[in-house]
């Protein structure tokens, strides 16, 4: 019986050198990190294909430089090319250099996978439009991200390889307190935080409401000591600035000292 040829047995027509920088190395095997990798290929594939073939999701890439010049994902890879791949630059606008996506998102909004429920709640507490459900399947998250132009946040790297996802991020940390800091830093959100403007339970925007309108929903002590209230028009839940709010405010202040009040 003849042995079926393995990929390692193949002879490829071309070869190119790739180097991935900063946190993009998180997606590579340990032995491939922080070093030049040789990619062997036939034909002239769009450069997005070998980047993803090596494990790096396209949504994590913001700049591709080939032989000293920036290129888009459609660039046809050539024999002997030297490719440098960079992650998103925090707080730096590189749009005059390269445009790997149609346009940046004008309004920040997220859809979060089932493994990041605490992160979703913290994002809502900071005022960010965040969709989350324990019932979301990966294909639903991809569809919501594409249709509503939301940034997909996930702990599943495979989800970010979906072609329909144009904006997404693989959350590295497993700790919720670090996850929220990681996302705020990654998307440079410190200056647009609006704490306690959304319902942490359903994502609705809170509205001021008169005390007399919600009096029948309040406990006696709450009714006695508090006069300012907010209500979520989506789920009807009533909020006020109790001691728990002050604790959260101090916590977020420690994380994001430059955040808007």
Image: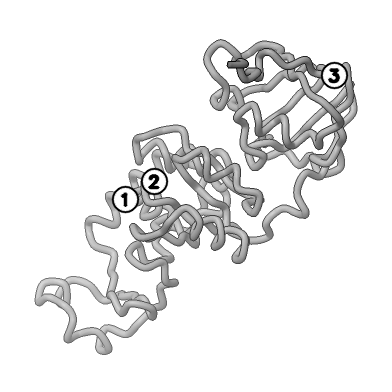
Q: Residue at x 79, y 40 (%)?
A: 73
Left or right: residue 194 compared with residue 101 = left
**1 or 3: mark nearer the eye:** 3
Residue 150's spot in the image, x, y percent? 58, 58
Q: Earlier in the sequence, mark 3 or mark 2?
A: 3
Q: Which residue is drawn at 86% across and 36% down?
A: 75
The numbered disc on residue 252 is 2
C-alpha gap between disc 1 and disc 3:
59 Å
Toward the viewer: 24 or 12?
12
Residue 24's spot in the image, x, y percent? 61, 27
Left or right: residue 21 compared with residue 242 = right
Toward the viewer: 172 or 233?
172
Q: Name the residue under label 1.
A: 248
Q: Mark 3 points at which residue?
A: 13
In contact (CB < 8 Å): disc 2 and disc 1: yes
Give SS at disc 1. Answer: helix
Local packing at callout 2 (Cα closer than 10 Å; few below 14, some 14-19, many 20+) is: many
Residue 93's spot in the image, x, y percent? 76, 42
Q: In which quarter of the image is residue 16?
A: top right
Residue 3's spot in the image, x, y percent? 60, 16
């Amino acid at each position: 019986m003849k042995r079926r040829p393995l990929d390692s047995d193949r002879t490829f027509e071309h070869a190119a050198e790739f180097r991935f920088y900063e946190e993009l190395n998180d997606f590579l095997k340990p032995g491939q990190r922080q070093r030049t990798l040789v990619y062997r290929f036939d034909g002239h594939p769009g450069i997005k294909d070998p980047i993803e073939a090596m494990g790096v999701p396209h949504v994590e890439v913001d700049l591709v430089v080939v032989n000293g010049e920036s290129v888009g994902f459609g660039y046809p890879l050539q024999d002997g090319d030297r490719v440098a791949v960079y992650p998103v630059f925090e707080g730096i606008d590189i749009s005059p250099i390269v445009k790997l996506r149609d346009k940046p998102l004008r309004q920040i909004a997220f859809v979060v996978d089932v493994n990041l429920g605490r992160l979703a709640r913290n994002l809502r507490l900071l005022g960010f439009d965040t969709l989350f459900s324990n019932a979301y399947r990966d294909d639903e998250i991809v569809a919501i991200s594409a249709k509503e132009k939301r940034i997909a946040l996930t702990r599943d790297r495979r989800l970010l390889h979906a072609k329909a996802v144009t904006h997404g991020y693989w959350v590295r940390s497993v700790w919720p307190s670090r996850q929220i800091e990681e996302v705020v830093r990654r998307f440079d959100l410190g200056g647009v935080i609006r704490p306690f403007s959304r319902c942490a339970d359903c994502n609705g925007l809170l509205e001021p409401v008169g005390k007399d309108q919600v009096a029948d929903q309040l406990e006696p002590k709450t009714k006695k000591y508090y006069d300012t209230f907010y209500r979520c028009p989506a789920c009807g839940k009533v909020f006020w600035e109790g001691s728990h709010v002050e604790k959260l405010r101090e916590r977020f202040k420690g994380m994001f000292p430059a955040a808007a009040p």
